Image (cartoon, helix red, strand yellow):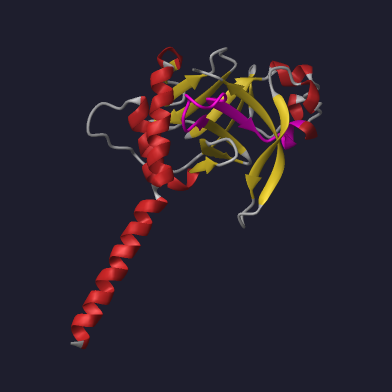
């Protein structure tokens, strides 16, 4: 009898555990579907990026791009990154020689991170959506939910992100390039004079879950 009770208790624990895991992955699941909706809404802005070994999604004004790899074993620099025009920052006082090495190239600024050296396998031909799904599945910690803006996002490291709306039909910021201003201010930028970027307080949470506000450069776009 005790053995049966033990088996029942273990079964209940397993069911609860599986249910909790399923619920905790809601962010990952909706991140996939909502990002796919963004791709479907911006077909002309999606391109295969041979130089970076992946895909790029350009802003409507082509001033910035989000780039994600389709094979981490072949990424030349970053597996995920944003790239944007340096000119507005230079015009606002940026001394590019004071930036960390590898961030400024020609007339662009690149912020990103390496995730690993995985050789990604696909059931069919790689697509932008399939490659993004691999990112979510293999590096789930890089995907988050920004409650204040009802956005999902990819963490690019060092306080930089690319975010998109959970529902573009109800959100006026469908995609947002999010940049940590610290290295730019340290390199001479007047944050209030960077044309095309908003310097603003952003509501977020610290590691303990406590609500805080942090300064960011934001470049939002309304797609729909």
Q: Whole-percent x and y of residue 212? A: 69, 47
Quarter of the image with the N terminus in it:
bottom left
Residue at the extreme bottom of the image, as rendered:
2
In magenta stretch: residue 64: no
Q: Whole-percent x and y of residue 204? A: 63, 44
Name the residue located 70 percent from the left edge and 25 percent from the top edge.
Answer: 198
Q: Nearer the viewer, residue 162 or 38?
A: 38
Q: Quadrant of residue 7?
A: bottom left
Residue 71 visible in the snapshot: no
Q: Is residue 18 above or below residue 213?
A: below
Name the residue located 61 percent from the left edge and 54 percent from the top edge.
Answer: 209
Name the residue located 47 percent from the left edge and 33 percent from the top edge.
Answer: 166
Residue at the extreme front of the image, as rendered:
170
Q: Is residue 147 above or below residue 196?
A: below
Name the residue located 60 percent from the left edge and 39 percent from the top edge.
Answer: 148
Q: Which residues are magenta?
A: 164-184
Residue 167 visible in the snapshot: yes
Q: Is residue 120 above or below residue 197?
A: below
The mark tally for this picture is 0
In magenta stretch: residue 165: yes
Q: Nearer the viewer, residue 221 or 96?
A: 221
Q: Nearer the viewer, residue 141 or 12?
A: 12
Q: Is residue 133 left or right of residue 200?
A: left
Q: Whole-percent x and y of residue 128? A: 37, 26
Q: Whole-percent x and y of residue 80? A: 49, 33
């Amino acid at each position: 009898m005790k053995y049966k009770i033990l088996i029942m208790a273990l079964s209940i624990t397993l069911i609860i555990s599986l249910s909790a895991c399923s619920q905790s992955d809601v962010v990952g699941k909706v991140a996939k579907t909502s990002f796919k909706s963004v791709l479907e809404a911006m077909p002309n802005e999606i391109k295969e990026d041979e130089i970076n070994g992946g895909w790029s999604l350009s802003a409507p004004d082509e001033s910035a791009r989000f780039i994600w790899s389709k094979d981490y074993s072949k990424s030349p620099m970053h597996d995920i990154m944003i790239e944007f025009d340096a000119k507005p920052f230079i015009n606002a006082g940026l001394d590019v020689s004071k930036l960390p090495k590898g961030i400024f190239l020609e007339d662009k600024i690149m912020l990103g991170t390496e995730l690993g050296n995985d050789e990604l396998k696909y059931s069919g031909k790689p697509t932008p959506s399939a490659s993004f799904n691999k990112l979510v599945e293999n590096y789930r910690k890089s995907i988050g939910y920004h409650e204040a803006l009802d956005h999902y996002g990819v963490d690019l490291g060092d306080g930089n992100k690319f975010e998109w709306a959970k529902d573009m039909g109800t959100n006026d910021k469908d995609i947002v390039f999010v940049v940590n201003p610290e290295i730019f201010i340290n390199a001479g930028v007047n944050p209030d004079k960077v044309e095309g970027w908003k310097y603003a307080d952003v509501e977020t949470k610290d590691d303990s879950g406590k609500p805080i506000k942090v300064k960011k450069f934001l470049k939002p776009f309304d797609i729909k």
